């Protein structure tokens, strides 16, 4: 399902991989309810500190004050990454934002591993349900456009999160995935002294976020001609699946090729790579991963992981909640301010940062990220986005939407 600045104490968000209760291997739908639910009280004091600073973007004021009684229905489509903590957190933050907003009477969520054609149908199913807005993590930048055009014709707002689409009526809100990969790759190549072999473990082939990360990785690679990429120039796809990533690294170790590897770049499949290396009895090579709880814990545990050098790049899974927040802004007549540096129009880019465990400042930043009680260790640590989410960390952890 990276990326990546070390002032991450601003956000609780991210630059982008392992689903639990919220997702299943088949499509699941939460029925709409006729009235909004109120937020359940947090069992722990709400935590406001969290990782990742987002590029500050604020919505332009509405031209007319929205009715306090306005209520909306939201559809949500997740077309892949089932079994991935990043995707689960993304969906749980969508539920939490819908609940915290007090403006969502029903949230219909569909989550399954499918291709672009399958997600196209899922979006059409949401259109048929008559929702007011659809938030979705796109499987392809262009293939969903026919359904998105149908949504626009029906007056339905559409928001792509985690990656972009080219539909002119859809807003995109996602981590800057090119920068995510570039920050991590540059750090890794510098740790290697600018030379050696890197095992390049990518995400889901064809996903826009994976494509952007490849651009960022290769941007850094062009600056370090002494680096060779293995197993080939385009790397190997993990599908953002922990089981696949674990098998790949175990096979790599068993084949003897790990012994000639000087660094590993992962697309968020990180802690299981570290554990596999530990189990093999091999020495660690520098590794880059995401701001996932389990990986950050490893980076800060020299007793159990002696000699481990690594960096975590923020990748905001809270874009799920931010997407719901944007949907409500649009439905209430507000127009967000687009990022002029983005490659697509109607786009908000969130800024990733990187923290390493090889400096005191980096370790302090990593430590500061571990602030949310009860957070699943497979989830990214940043769980809120300033200006774009209103739920508490406790609400996100609870993973409850309206009516649940």
Image: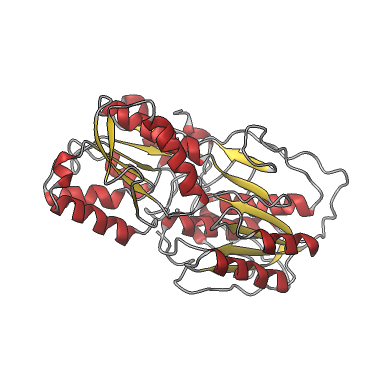
Q: Exactly how many numbered labels are in the figure?
A: 0
> What residue is rendered at 42% in x and 57% in y?
85
Left or right of 373 in this view: 140: right
Examine the image and state in which quarter residue 72 appears.
Answer: bottom right
Residue 156 in picture, x, y percent from top left:
76, 61
Above or below 279: residue 402: below
Residue 367 in picture, x, y percent from top left:
37, 36
Examine the image and state in which quarter residue 184 appears.
Answer: top left
Residue 154 in picture, x, y percent from top left:
79, 65
> What residue is rendered at 62% in x and 55% in y?
97
Left or right of 236 in this view: 158: right
> What residue is rendered at 55% in x and 45% in y?
384
Q: Please indicate, yes or no, whether residue 356 appears anywhere in the rendered image.
A: yes
Task: Say how the picture is coloured.
Answer: secondary structure
Above or below 34: residue 238: above
Residue 265 in picture, x, y percent from top left:
32, 41
Examine the image and state in which quarter residue 284 appears.
Answer: top left
Q: Please indicate, yes or no, whether residue 3 appears anywhere in the rendered image.
A: no
Task: Pick the quarter of the image with the C terminus.
Answer: bottom right
Q: Nearer the viewer, residue 232 or 87?
A: 232
Q: Nearer the viewer, residue 218 or 63?
A: 218
Q: Nearer the viewer, residue 270 or 226?
A: 226
């Amino acid at each position: 399902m990276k990326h990546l600045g070390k002032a991450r104490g601003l956000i609780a968000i991210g630059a982008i991989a392992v689903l639990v209760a919220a997702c299943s291997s088949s499509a699941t739908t939460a029925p709409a309810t006729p009235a909004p639910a109120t937020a359940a009280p947090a069992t722990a004091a709400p935590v406001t500190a969290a990782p990742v600073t987002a590029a500050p973007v604020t919505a332009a004021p509405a031209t007319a004050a929205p009715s306090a009684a306005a209520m909306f229905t939201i559809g949500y489509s997740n077309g892949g990454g089932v079994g991935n903590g990043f995707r689960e957190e993304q969906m749980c933050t969508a539920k939490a934002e819908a609940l915290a907003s007090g403006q969502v009477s029903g949230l219909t969520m569909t989550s399954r591993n499918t291709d672009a054609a399958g997600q196209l149908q899922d979006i059409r199913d949401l259109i048929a349900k008559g929702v007011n807005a659809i938030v979705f993590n796109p499987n392809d930048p262009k293939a969903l456009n026919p359904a998105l055009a149908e949504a626009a014709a029906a007056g339905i707002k559409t928001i792509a999160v985690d990656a972009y689409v080219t539909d002119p009526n859809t807003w995109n809100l996602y981590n800057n995935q090119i920068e995510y990969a570039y920050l991590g790759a540059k750090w890794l190549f510098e740790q290697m002294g600018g030379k050696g072999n890197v095992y390049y473990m990518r995400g889901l082939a064809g996903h826009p976020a994976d494509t952007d990360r490849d651009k960022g990785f290769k941007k850094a690679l062009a600056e370090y001609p002494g680096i060779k990429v293995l197993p080939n120039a385009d790397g190997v796809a993990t599908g953002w699946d922990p089981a696949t990533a674990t098998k790949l690294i175990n096979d790599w170790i068993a084949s003897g090729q790990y012994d000639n590897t000087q660094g590993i770049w992962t697309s968020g499949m990180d802690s299981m790579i570290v554990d596999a290396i530990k189990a093999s009895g091999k020495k660690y090579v520098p590794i880059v991963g995401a701001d996932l709880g389990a990986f950050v814990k490893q980076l800060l545990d020299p007793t159990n992981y002696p000699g481990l050098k690594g960096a975590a790049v923020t990748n905001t899974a809270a874009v799920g909640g931010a997407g719901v927040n944007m949907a409500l802004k649009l439905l209430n007549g507000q127009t967000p301010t687009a990022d002029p540096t983005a490659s697509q129009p109607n786009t908000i880019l969130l800024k990733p940062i990187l923290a390493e465990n090889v400096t005191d400042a980096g370790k302090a930043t990593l430590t500061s990220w571990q602030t949310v009680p009860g957070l699943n260790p497979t989830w990214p640590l940043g769980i809120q986005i300033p200006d774009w989410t209103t739920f508490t960390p406790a609400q996100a952890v609870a993973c409850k939407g309206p009516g649940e």
